[in-house]
Amino acid sequence: MNPEHGSSEALVRGDNVRKTYRMGAEDIHALDGVSFKIARGEFLSIMGPSGSGKSTLMNLLGALDRPSAGRLEIDNAPIGDMTPDQLAALRNRTIGFVFQQFNLLARTSALENVKLPMLYAHKRPSDLNKAAQEVLDLVGLGDRLDHHPAQLSGGQQQRVAIARALVNRPQILLADEPTGALDTQTSEEIMQLFTNLNQSGVTVIIVTHEQEIADWTNRVMRLRDGKIVTDERLKERLHVVS
Amino acid sequence: MSFLDAIIAALKSLRQNMLRSILTTLGIMIGIASVIVMSSINAGAQQKVEEQIASLGSTMLSVSPGASRRGGRSSGANSAPQLSERNLDAIKQAVPNVVDAIGEVRVSTTAVAGGADWPTTITGVHAGFPVVRNWPVATGRFFSEQEVSSGRRYAVVGETIVKEVFEGTNPIGGQLRIGNVPFEVIGVLAAKGQNQFGRDEDDLIVAPASAVRARLAGRDATVPDQLDSIRVLFADNTDLVRAESDLMDIMRTQRRIRPGQADNFRVFNIAEFIRARNETAQTFGVLLAATAAISLLVGGIGIMNIMLVSVTERTREIGLRLAIGARKNDILIQFLVEAVTLCLIGGIIGLGLGLASTTVVAKVAGWDVLINANLVLIAILASAAVGVFFGFFPARRAAKLNPIDALRYE
């Protein structure tokens, strides 16, 4: 696969991206020169068995880490050249994270959890409560503002986490096994929420090892041994949007 | 993250572990309480000493006959020749910067008036007593130098004599029989209360030195115009070291001491003596300071320990905060603010405890304490400093976490 240069539509552009870890005397090539482009508005899943490099790729796409070699641009910013504080600002502004284990602050209300990313933002809305309430409305939890994580179901907790990821209006929603801790029914509801968010214009990237989850997306990138082995764009959605 | 946000977050997090937070700050509480008690006792002692020095006259030197030496052995303070009126006159004339000087002759006796009798001391002095001893007359008057020369049997009494001998009635014009010699009371000295060593300063009678010597001393005096001691008041801002040496020169001449021969008198700087005595109190202060420092150290280590536990427990939270855009500094400040807040809470409780204990010490042990507004500042600054110092290492450890590892931490 050759990288397609010059497209201004690309939100993420990877060019021969490598990530090498040193383990004892050996170098582990977690990512062995991958090149790809992700356009604005895509709904993408990244698949692969453990050790394939998909977690490493996700960390790079989330600006949690910098490549060892090659070039990776997120929203036209080359993350390899950025300082830790610049990366933090990029994560705050451009990327919204959703985790398998939700990672909500315990004994803290849904509203406070959702407000958290705004506290670290340079420019923050004048009314944090209102902004947080809006995104909680969007994920269907407008009536659970004062509930603590322990008082919410898994699906509801993940909705709070998604609201938190959305509150700073990011370009990319990056979800790591977002349904891994949920039952089938709830998983489908969450995937439906991601689909709706994607249709409203947010680029959604989901890292998963479940085919049923990947089937919701329009593009599936498969990794093995640190390389992209297939990258399929699906013309038609397998799931009927209800 | 703004500072206010950090403080709110810190308070929330501390409230979630209320019991642990309180136990952790115990060391700080005790430390700050000790600091408060120590400072107020020290300040109280200091103030008391300065008051005493001021009341004695901080520019006063006393001369008394000192141990003379024979064959290198001291033969005791009383074996030296007595001081005399002539010495006093010489000092007044020849020593520079002298405001006034008086002699004192002391006799232990029993004072009788009406039916009451009272064992006390009568001190024969000169007219300069109120000035030299910085001890004014409260009612009535003091006797003049002329009355001293003519040996009038006048007496000026302390508050305790009024109370014990005259049973609180106005003694002026009344008679006081001392060793069967009648003295007329012409004045009452201002009340002074107890001195540093607990002696009642107001239990005294002063009378003209001549009258006391002639009528009461009755000693086998080697010098007919003997004095037990001489007190010399110098002008304000006199260099007392210089004054002391001037005084000694005159005394050596007076007593015909040859160069190289040891002095047979002593010159005594009361202010210095009291300051030196006060070093005992200061030693006690140092001990308290050490206790306070150790409590704060132990308390600080407790804070550090609990903050390290907290950082470990909240590794995933730190990972999440980093993932959603917290910078290393935000994390550092969050944990530092948490440690400082914890210490400040302990410090404020410690301040309350310290003030309460100080009040109790003052009431129960009867110690002089001085509580001033600086203590609040000391408590806050000391506890904040402990928080910053011992909170920094855990906070830096939190800030150094790698977001990827922290998010995966189980």
Image (spheres, coloured by chain):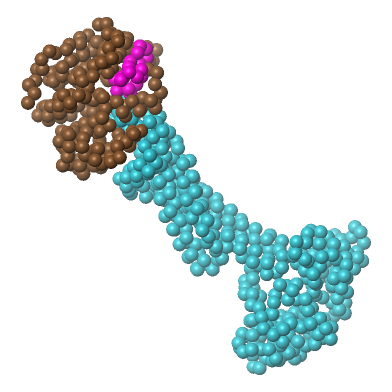
Chain colours: A brown, B cyan
User: B249 and A241: which one is in front?
Assistant: A241
Percent coordinates x, y for residue B334 in the rendering: 38, 38
Percent coordinates x, y for residue B328 in the rendering: 39, 31
Q: Quadrant of residue A18?
A: top left
* Rendered view: A229 above or below B326: above
Q: Tell me: A106 left or right of B303.
A: left
Percent coordinates x, y for residue A80 in the rendering: 37, 17
* Rendered view: B203 above or below A69: below
User: B130 and B8: which one is in front?
Assistant: B8
Is residue B27 visible from the viewing direction of this image? Answer: no
Q: Quadrant of residue B110?
A: bottom right
Residue found at x 87% / y 62%: B249
Residue found at x 24% / y 38%: A132
Which region shows up in magenta? A60-79
Is residue B164 visible from the viewing direction of this image? Answer: yes
Decide whether residue A73 is among the magenta residues. yes
* Rendered view: B280 above or below A150: below
Residue found at x 16% / y 24%: A199
Quadrant the N terminus of chain B occupies: top left
Decide whether residue B86 is among the magenta residues. no
User: A208 and B31: which one is in front?
Assistant: A208
User: As drawn, which residue projects farthest toward the top?
Assistant: A2
Q: Quadrant of residue A146?
A: top left
Q: Tell me: B380 left or right of B153.
A: left
Residue found at x 80% / y 72%: B101
